[in-house]
Image (tube, rainbow, N blue to C red):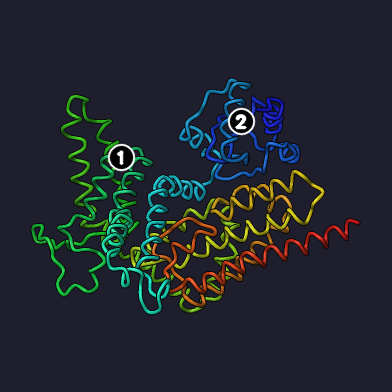
Amino acid sequence: MDRQAVEQIIEAVGGKENIAAATHCVTRLRFALKDEGKVDKEKLENIDLVKGSFSANGQYQVVIGQGLVDKVYAEMVAITGIGEASKEEIKDAAAQNLNPLQRAIKTLADIFIPILPAIVTAGLLMGINNILTGKDIFFEGQAFIDVYTGWADFASIINLIANTAFVFLPGLIGWSAVNKFGGSPLLGIVLGLMLVHPDLLNAWGYGAAKEVPTWNLFGLTVEKVGYQGQVLPVLLASYVLAKMEIFLRKRIPDAFQLLTVAPIALLVTGFLSFIVIGPITFAIGNLITDGVVGIFDAAPAIGGLIYGGLYAPLVITGMHHTFLAVDLQLIGTIGGTFLWPMVALSNIAQGSAAFAMMFADKDNEKLKGLSMTSAISAWLGITEPAMFGVNLRYRYPFIAAIIGSAIAGIVITLRGVMAPSIGVGGLPAFLSIFTEFWGVFFIGMGIALVVPFVLTFIMAKTRKKKEA
């Protein structure tokens, strides 16, 4: 590890005294700085170790790269003497710089990011199931399991494993949300699973049910309906549960807490969930779904243009995390999402624009190496090195990527491309797309690969001529 380069990073972010807290993720150093105005961005990004930098959600983030970031962070701790901060500590320090909207977005991100591995895994497994059960992939008019029937049960087990994360989605959200709001994660799991209990009418069968079962609570009729695939009911219920638990823990003596806090908090929240929270948020969730679907039904080209083009800028602000909740709501309500396929194409477009820079400026060895590695990373679903290390630094590759992504978004939304789950972005994304849409999705992938590359290359050459 180049100690001097790490010292340069510390100096470029304003020195040791400007660092309130620091941690790292898979690819980036994350700083909570006392004054971001002291950052020398140009000096920072000229350091060989640094692939880009940006400010988001109150944190100043420096892109280093997978594997290497751990060593850089360890060396930085050794140089500065700053104790290794937990992610929660640096998030709390960074939150002081956020406005109310940013804090709301950050809260959603903190809830959904921890459950992403389970959701993405489900998407990948659904992709394998799609290959085995989709018609016209290997045989005309037939699926693989129709010809090789011995594989049918194998595909069925894969489908069961893949669907588990979505069948019990409220349990996952309940665990993460209650933990975020300061309550006991275990109670969050119980709350989430309670909302999808087998004794309740499955939410997916609610519309077709001839008779909805009910409870009679001293004259008050309450529908016995589950909330499978729903996001808002468990989010609000988790908030109520956590705050009630905190309230009770402050007022009940320690000796009685085990026997009283959890039962009271869960009982009250349970009744509120079925009587008030569930019905109201279920209706709101359906209105949101109907609104999003209505917009894309009425003007799919405009919807594809706007979402396909604006997704990358949303990543810069962190607002893209809010759409994860919309994706999950769409999957739970209509059986698939038409938003996530555009996210996958946006990843590809960012990678293609970065890759073009490798050929556009052959004299810059650092740029060539960074362009190639960050492009491959983006094509596999991780866009930060390409977006912040190359495209935003030179601006015109970012614009080219947005244009390519927008065009690809129009093409796939016009044909109604959908995914049954959120999967891995980038080139492997087709595995998580319904097989009947593979053809048009491959066309969209082609557009996202070619258009940003060509536009970036042309703009780079035009810029060089003007400079000459």
Q: Residue furthest right?
A: 468
Secondary structure under tag 1 reads: helix
Q: Position of residue 349 (x, y in %)?
A: 62, 61
Q: Along the line of sight, which residue is nearer the eye, 228 or 404?
A: 404
Q: Position of residue 166 (x, y in %)?
A: 32, 57
Count of all numbered marks drawn on residues in the image: 2
Q: Are marks 1 and 2 in contact (CB under 8 Å)?
A: no
Q: Along the line of sight, which residue is nearer the eye, 5 or 103?
A: 5
Quadrant location of the C terminus? bottom right
Q: Amino acid at mark 1?
A: Pro
Q: Which residue is mark 2?
A: 72
Q: Along the line of sight, which residue is nearer the eye, 273 or 83?
A: 83
Q: Residue at x 77, y 45 (%)?
A: 365
Secondary structure under tag 2 reads: helix
The quadrant in which residue 289 appears is bottom left
Relative to residue 136, is residue 161 depicted above or below? above
Q: Earlier in the sequence, mark 1 or mark 2?
A: 2
Q: Which residue is mark 1?
A: 185
Q: Residue at x 78, y 62 (%)?
A: 459
Residue 288 visible at all: no
Separation (CA) of disc 1 from disc 2 = 33 Å
Q: Residue at x 19, y 51 (%)?
A: 271
- Checking the image for residue 216, the label placed there is none
Relative to residue 315, is residue 265 depicted above or below? above
How crowded pointer 1 is (Cα within 10 Å; few <14, some 14-19, many 20+) is rated as: many
Position of residue 436 in the picture relative to residue 282 (left or right): right
